[in-house]
Image: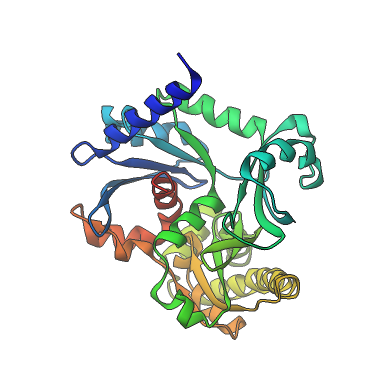
Amino acid sequence: MNPFLESYFEFIKRLILSCQGDAGVIGLDIGPLACRAVELCRKQGGFEVVRWIVEPIEGVDEKAALVKILEKLGPSVRTRPLIVSLSGKGTLIRHVDIPRMSNSDLRKAFPLEADKYFPFPKETVYTDCFILDPKGQDKKMSVIVAAVKKDIVEGRLKLLKECGVEPVSLTIVSVAVANTFAAFPPPTCSREDLGGKAVALIDMGETLTSLMIMSDGIPRFTRDIFMGMADVARRVANTAGLSLPQARALCALGAPAGHEAEIQKSVEAVLTNLVAEIRLSFDYFSTERKLPVGRICLIGDGVYASHVESMFAAHFDIPLVVWNPAEVLQTTVNRDALVKEGRRMITAIGLAVGEYD
């Protein structure tokens, strides 16, 4: 069969499957502490969460958590478009300005120029690119370029195959977060509220804090800073004489009497270094793009930890909001619990909603 027709019929098949009954698109985020799945379906006036599942990862056995999630999703997971996350030190995104050209010309030229943007040998990575302003009239255009080490991609595909599923695509976490922001931005981040300024999304996770700066709904800057709640937990464990699991539980649940000081000092020590790195990125972005950051959105597991939100607010003189896109999503499935978990579901939501765009 003609390759074009094969692609066309595959698209029609996926479209039909995703529109039958309550069927939708499934975003699956495999993180360091948990696997999270969200099934989204487009409804009149927005999107509806058909179902959502969180399965903690015990130790390093992500396969066991993934198997449990797939069992809960049931056989239908094999008939829905499935988009899965990629993250880690072997993933990289750059934002570049290059002479304007068509998408087809960019696709031809990019493989020849990829070495300029990534510190990895060309034969060890998969790369991709995307024009951020395809309708622009300037002589130069903004392009997002991405690279992922082949062993990360192949390891993820192998894991999924062993579990009996095949994804439609794999997406870098920061791209998924940008999808969610574009679809469900915080109310205080409209163009009118920002007054022409940019928005910084700070995603504080277990071992990594991802910074993304958005302007007009488009990601203009990304950076991964390898500090997170694991660093806070280690400091608490050392200063309070606790095991690492005990320290992590205290950080997540709040400190009982006698440990408040250790947690506050540990959070302050880690955030002081983290904030310094974020400020450097803000300064670089503002100088390079001539655009100041006017709002900070906090997301991720770290938002829940004791003192984190208040200390971020104390360190920056920029308005700060804790962003939870689940607040604007329709659902008939345990809405209160979804909203409570929503700040941790941003990647899974973005994986699913991106397939509709």
**Residue 241 in view (yes/no):** no
Residue 244 on image: x %, y %: 55, 54
User: Which residue is located at x 44 percent, y 75 percent?
Assistant: 190
Q: Quadrant of residue 12?
A: top left
User: Which residue is located at x 21 percent, y 36 percent?
Assistant: 20
Which quadrant would the N terminus be assigned to in this image? top left
Residue 330 on image: x %, y %: 24, 58
- Out of 23 and 325, give the one closest to the viewer: 23
Q: Is residue 163 above or below residue 120?
A: above
User: Which residue is located at x 33 percent, y 61 percent?
Assistant: 326
User: Which residue is located at x 35 percent, y 58 percent?
Assistant: 341
Q: How is the image coloured?
A: rainbow
Left or right of residue 295, residue 329 in this image: left
Q: Quadrant of residue 163?
A: top left
- Out of 258 and 286, give the one closest to the viewer: 286
Residue 68 on image: x %, y %: 34, 34
Residue lying at the far top in this picture: please name it: 1
- Out of 356 and 231, give the one closest to the viewer: 356
- Out of 268 and 225, give the one closest to the viewer: 225
Residue lying at the far bottom in this picture: please name it: 317
Q: Count up the numbered dots.
A: 0
**Residue 100 in view (yes/no):** yes
Residue 42 on image: x %, y %: 28, 49
Q: Is residue 217 above or below residue 81?
A: below
Left or right of residue 188, residue 209 in this image: right
